[in-house]
Image (spheres, helix red, strand yellow):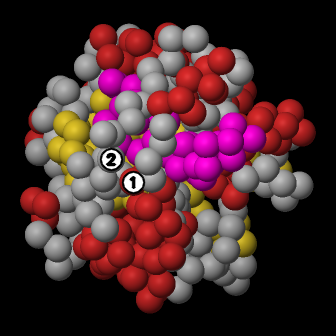
Amino acid sequence: MRASDRRKLPRTGLSLSLLGLGCAPLGNLFSAVSDAQALATVDAAWAAGLRYFDTAPFYGHGLSEHRLGQALRERPRAQYCLSTKVGRLLKPKAGKPAEKQNGWVGPLPFEPQFDYSAGGIRRSLEDSLQRLGMASIDMALVHDIGGATHGELHGLYWQQLTEGGGLRELESLRDEGLVSSVGLGVNEWQVVIDVLKHIDLDCTLLAGRYTLLDQSALHPFLDIAAQRSVGVVIGGPFNSGILATGPSRDAKFDYGAAPLEIVMRAEQLQTVCNEFDVPLAAAALQFPLAHPAVVSCVPGARNVQELQQVAAWLETPVPASLWERLLEKGLLLPGTPLPVAEA
């Protein structure tokens, strides 16, 4: 597999590179990234053949969108695909800028507020277009809708999205040509199925739920996505780091410290990968791309070295026997599509 290989969204024909760049790190996720470093990372991604870039207003409270727009502005617009999120508005925040907020180091001086109503969805997209310096977006994804994010407030935001016209407005933006494809950007697959009862989605970006560590989205979600022609982008293929760094006491899983049972399972995965002399991260990156519903994978990178390493992992040969061994040991669910080793 190569980073520049392409797959298309079944419903709209939008073409995405097999490997995309997740741009949360460009918003200073967990640690600061300079403007020059962010620009160099995007340049390195382009040089490696990546033509899909994913960002969101929430990332650095607008910082990621500003940096990505600057980095892409001189690139031929027809040659790349860009996705951003809707569902949060950024309100100016007076007073001393926060040193760290919501996991972002030195974010821009704005306070994110959820708004999934029709007006909120449109305003969110229009604000993103201004930050990016672009006239249209390829993929508009409703960000973080679901009970895992909102808890007891999920009903309120769900009502905004459905009865409050949020989903209809998303379709209107597509009809007007401001976006080419519409979907969700979430960490839980259940809410995607709920939304599919209301509208046809072109795509969804699902983070962390179809990985070597967590295959909970395999059934029924990925089956339904394939049946409904929903192109699935896999975010968080390393589950926030543990599948890239390997299991350790400091390993991260789903944006926090990895629980003991996750570390132990990662150790089992690491043992099998060591047996075949394959980096755990290479297996983790290639695994989700074997499913026919998956169109792209978007790990994050905060510098040129990380980006180049991710691209190399994608091209690392992985023997079929490794996948079979994982299946034998119960580390992959029965019926999981396995990558095919290239000749």
Q: Secondary structure at mark 1?
A: helix
For the question of whether residue 106 can be seen, the reply is yes
- Quick one: quadrant of the C terminus? top left
Q: Which residue is mark 1?
A: 315
Q: Which residues are magenta?
A: 271-297
Front residue of 313 and 262: 313
Q: How far across and how far down the image is residue 274, in percent?
A: 69, 47
Asked if the stretch drawn in magenta spans residue 5, the answer is: no
Residue pictured at 67% horizontal, 34% vertical: 213
Amino acid residing under circle 2: Met
The answer to whether 320 is drawn above or below residue 257 in the figure is above
Label located before the other in sequence (1 or 2):
2
Q: Secondary structure at mark 2?
A: loop
Q: How far across and how far down the image is residue 149, in percent?
A: 65, 37
Residue 1: mark in rendering: 2
Q: How far across and how far down the image is residue 287, in percent?
A: 49, 36
